[in-house]
Amino acid sequence: MAKSKTAFVCGECGAEFPRWQGQCSECKEWNTISEIRLAPASAASRNSRFSGYAGALDNKVQTLDEIALTEIPRIHSGFQELDRVLGGGLVPGSAILIGGNPGAGKSTLLLQVMCGLAGRMKTLYVTGEESLQQVAMRAQRLNLPRDKLRMLSETSVEQICQVAREEKPAVMVIDSIQVMHVAEVQSAPGSVSQVREAAAQLTRFAKQQGVVILMVGHVTKDGTLAGPKVLEHCIDCSVMLDGAADNRFRTLRSHKNRFGAVNELGVFAMTETGMKEVNNPSAIFLSRGEEQTTGSVVMVIWEGTRPLLVELQALVDYSQLANPRRVTVGLEHNRLALLLAVLHRHGGMQMADQDVFVNVVGGVRVEDTSADLALLLSLVSSFRDKALPKELVVFGEVGLSGEIRPVPSGQERLMEAAKHGFTRAIVPWANRPKQAPAGMEVIAVKKLEEALAAL
């Protein structure tokens, strides 16, 4: 019997090493390297014809102009928010990974999608964590049609591919990738080697057969997808379904997409009858009180292909500590420290002895730099104990020299704010519109001092 070969792979970056070591020399992370068992030579020779994640059977060299550019029709999932995140729908032959915290609604959303698609095409739902009875009970509770969707309870990747070749589904769900196992890999399901090989084989199968495969992925305690980074490299799309346990709203965000824009955002609401899409997400993030409060301002951020209105709150209070606290929820912590330095240097406001707390209402994670100006104005409002007008909306990037830089899609942001009843806006000078929206006063500023004077 031939001795099985092993390798040592980093679970964070996917780098391989000849022996175990405490720190990965590529990504500098500690205790992320684990031993995996490689498939024996006999299995490798059998699968040599299907090597590679792309799964191409034709190895002939071609030039770019010889490749046929036929348009591949997308499959609409039945949810406009999901189609938006995926770039317009499901692409045949693609492998999509959907991650999220336990209870976020991954299985519920996919079950609704598959029950809807089953009436139009062949589908196959493979469950490895739940029994068929549990899935059927969920479908009955959600009042979903159950007469068309084909179900399979299996964890062996080879058996799943064999059944799929006989059933010939157009869309297939794997729930979840962490419980799947490959026979040639002698390790427990959920290990780095099993997740790596299972995802590779399923991705090859999707490319060869033209099947859309939706894989459910678990997340670790720090909120990242469990398994090696090579899992995210070999798939076509990676989306995350986020939502707090005490909040009925869920956000679906794209982190990688070979067929559309990344950082696209879709919003869903968890109800008794399943996931419902929210067509106007700005409305749920603008549930403000009747009275004006200090430190509160509405900003317009850009998520993927559409504007989104979000409320930002700041609290500045005198600190009793030697090192005042800087707490951010929904914003980058380093960005806050940078803007506080700009406010001190170019705004003349010293907050070195103040505790600063910043929160984005609704649990939205903001990475757009257009939130800089809104953050500074909310800090000034709380520091001065002076409330900002409720009809005011703000956006703009702030540079280190105090200049207000333009942001993309300024006209679309103003139109979205005007649609929700805002009548006043502070924007960068370069984003001033040729014609302001009806009933809106637009104040264009070049410097931070001008923005503070406009309050």
Image (cartoon, rainbow, N blue to C red):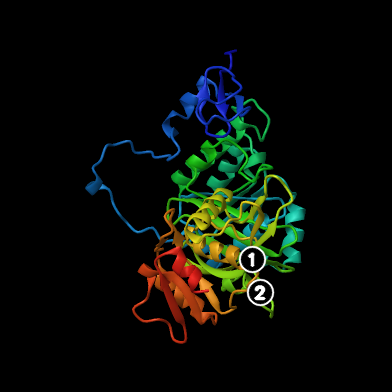
| Residue to which mark 2 is pinned | 287
Q: Percent from the top left, x then y, of residue 210?
A: 45, 50
The amino acid marked with disc number 2 is Ser
Question: Which of the 4 quarters of the picture holds residue 1?
Answer: top right
Q: Secondary structure at mark 2?
A: loop
* Distance Cα–Cα, label 2 vs label 1: 20 Å
Question: Which of the 4 quarters of the picture holds residue 378?
Answer: bottom right
Q: How many marks?
A: 2
Q: Secondary structure at mark 1?
A: helix
Q: Nearer the viewer, mark 2 or mark 1?
A: 1
Is the residue marked by circle 1 packed among few (<14), some (14-19), or many (20+) residues within 10 Å?
A: many
Q: Residue at x 33, y 36 (%)?
A: 59
Residue 199 appears anywhere in the view? yes
Q: Earlier in the sequence, mark 2 or mark 1?
A: 2
Residue 170 appears anywhere in the view? no
Would you say 401 lies left or right of 219 here? left
Q: Residue at x 50, y 61 (%)?
A: 347
Tell me: residue 78, above or below residue 424. above
Between 303 and 380, the one nearer to me in the picture: 380
Tell me: residue 176, above or below residue 16. below
Would you say 396 lies left or right of 356 here? left
The amino acid marked with disc number 1 is Ser
Q: Percent from the top left, x then y, of residue 330?
A: 61, 56
Q: Residue at x 72, y 54 (%)?
A: 103
Say if mark 2 contacts mark 1, CB within 8 Å: no
Is the residue marked by circle 2 packed among few (<14), some (14-19), or many (20+) residues within 10 Å?
A: few
Tell me: residue 242, above or below residue 146. above
Q: Residue pushed farthest bottom?
A: 439
| Residue to which mark 1 is pinned | 382
Q: Residue at x 44, y 28 (%)?
A: 48
Tag shown at residue 71: none
